[in-house]
Image (tube, coloured by chain):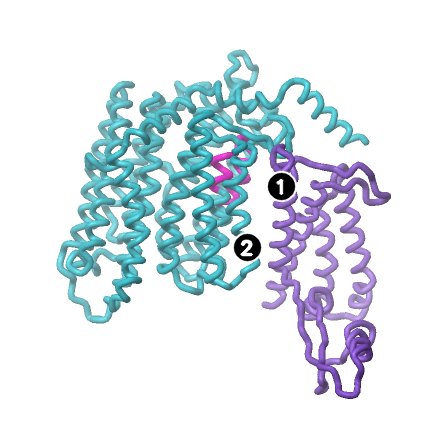
Amino acid sequence: MHPDLLLVLPLLIPLYGTLLCLFLWQREVWQSIMTGVVQLLWLGSVLLLLREVLSAHVVSTQIGNWPAPFGITLVADMFSVLMLVAAAVASLAVYLYALQGLDLTRQRFGYFPLLLLLQMGISGVCLTGDLFNMFVWFEVLLICCFALLSLGGSKSQLEGTLKYVTINFLASGLLLSGIGVVYSLYGSLNLAELAVLVREPHHPNLPLLSMASVFFLVGFGIKSAIFPLFFWLPASYHAPPIAISALIAGLVTKVGIYAFIRLFTLVFVSDSGITLPLLAGLSALTMLVGVIGAAAQTDFKKILSFHIISQIGYMLMGLAIFTPLALAGSIFFILHNILVKTNLFLVSGLVAQRYRTFSLKKLGGVYLLQPVLALLFLLTALSLAGTPPLSGFWGKLMLAKGGLEAGNYILVTVSLGVSLITLFSMTKIWNEVFWKPRPRTDRPDTILPPVSKLRRRMAYLPVVFLLACILGMGIFASPIVRFSERAADGLLQVQPYTDTVLAKSKPEQVEESKQIHETALHP
Amino acid sequence: MRTLIFATTIRYLTPLFLIFSVYILFRGHNHPGGGFIGGLIGSIAFVFHVLAHGPERTAGTYFQLTFYHQSRQEHYSLPRHMWQLLQANTWNRVKQGSPSPWRYYMLRVRPAYMMATGLLVAATSGFAGLLAGLPYMTGFWLPFKLPLVGGLGTPLLFDTGVYLLVLGMILKMVFTMSKE
């Protein structure tokens, strides 16, 4: 298919889904059917895009046919498409879970349209080729997150949302200031053009670029929960029901990291002597603090929330090492983490559906009652910790190998140590929730009677589906590793990216569009 | 706060605001204006109406159509029956309240539907470009220009969508907030 169509489809399919959901307001059955169809279509459109990118490396389109530095650019390269594929798979699983795991009130009052709008936001961030548009798509995403986090309006949810909203507004303000600074320095916000301008060695504003990059470091640092700015994440992610928090925990922070990696490989590369050690320090601290925070928790969801932070550190590690192998490791790790983290949240949701609690002290003996669920959790958790044949191992292997080759021994040591503590933390959940005998409680009715067999199997479906993807990713790792390496190459060699975007603006076309702008302004 | 002066004034101001908002919408492509601002100005009319008369009356006056119907009486011929229906639905409208043989159907334009329609129009206007084999949202204009309105084309369609979206959004907010 033509790239003009292929690139807008991942945006338009969720948008039209949202529209249909709005027309079918409060008819949750119709909305859920519609959303299911849209999930499949979205996955399909993203896979088509992947096929296109496999043959053409970079594809781009100019919205409204205005040439590149002036118009709105949509670009897809390997990295963005891989992100979208993982996001589509994860959100399909979350949707399947929400069908039976989310209460009807929340389904009726807009869960489905918000889910679809969130997906449109993710597509937007991943496909945009313009700094300001990236900001706007982030806002789309965040507004959906605000609404989803507070959907239902229980007290703890509102408290969590308030923290999330406050800190994210601050981050958005910083980003917007950074965008203003970049525009004043280079007079353009098109990422491809910026990438070309920044690589000119004698540009007068080059020394000031690192000042602009600090805004983005802090802004995206907040949004993706990097070391000193992570505190909002565990506070707000544990409050909403699992069908919401799994989606946000699995996807939204990773989209922040995507933007981070995209900008710091494409635009803010000028003084890597300062940024890279800084990033290395931040990533080591993020890993450590996240995993130590997790070790102190005694709540299923909170442990998982802290682990998000520690894994963000790994994703940053590849960027800090900045070699092709390490970046590929980062990308592989992001893909793996989207699936695994979503799956762990879904498992915790299945446990809590039956036992009505997330507290490790009150849970126990799940292994005896639901051995299949225990097995599903075990495999996913081992994959998160990075046990050899599973997907987490390959990501960590690539990161460690890249780090050792680049001589970043401290960072590698920290990452391996953190892996060990992650394993400890997962073992803690396994022991407390699944293995130890069920504690005696005063209330004998905390175990809900099991629902019908078919419904229970349906409930396992999303977890089994995601686990199949994770196992596939671990066992047949080589094509995905190859994809990640290609994505990393695409990040480091910006030439194809900038050429594809800017080739659409041939000089005469630029002249013509300038004339059109002129006549439009002074008729 | 329901004052007679305000309520009377707003009756004359409402069409003015609406006409001005549509004017702003049409001139918006090449001049200051457009769907967003037009929608905001258009919504001022309804916001004032809500302030003067309350949300139920605004919804009833502007966003609701009532159709009256009754089955044909025995001694009426078909043309006479149709004439009666036409009369009841247009200039000689049925008064509600007293027990009457009329049944009525209400067609409501909810703000949420207005928003959805606006988004639908705006998003669909971009497909013209795709159908022509050009990128999404490529603008196409009709070759002639109308007096007062200016050129007609797909960007105008997009702006109309934005107009409806903004109008629906503001109305939704105002209706929700004035209920509490």
How packed is label 1: few (under 14 Cα within 10 Å), some, or many (20 or more)? some
Q: Which residues are magenta?
A: A122-141
Pointer 1 chain: B
Name the disc covering residue A20, or none.
Answer: 2
Q: Nearer the viewer, residue A464 or A264?
A: A464
Relative vertical location of residue A257 with respect to residue A435 in this rendering, above or below? above
Q: Callout 1: helix, strand or loop?
A: helix
How packed is label 2: few (under 14 Cα within 10 Å), some, or many (20 or more)? some
Q: Residue furthest front?
A: B77
B83 relative position to A75: left or right: right
Residue located at (80% from left, 53% from top): B19
Residue located at (69% from left, 36% from top): B139
- Asked if labels 1 and 2 touch by Cβ distance under 8 angstroms, the answer is no
> Which of the chains is purple?
B
Relative vertical location of residue B139 with respect to residue B51 in this rendering, above or below? above
Please name the color used to draw chain A: cyan
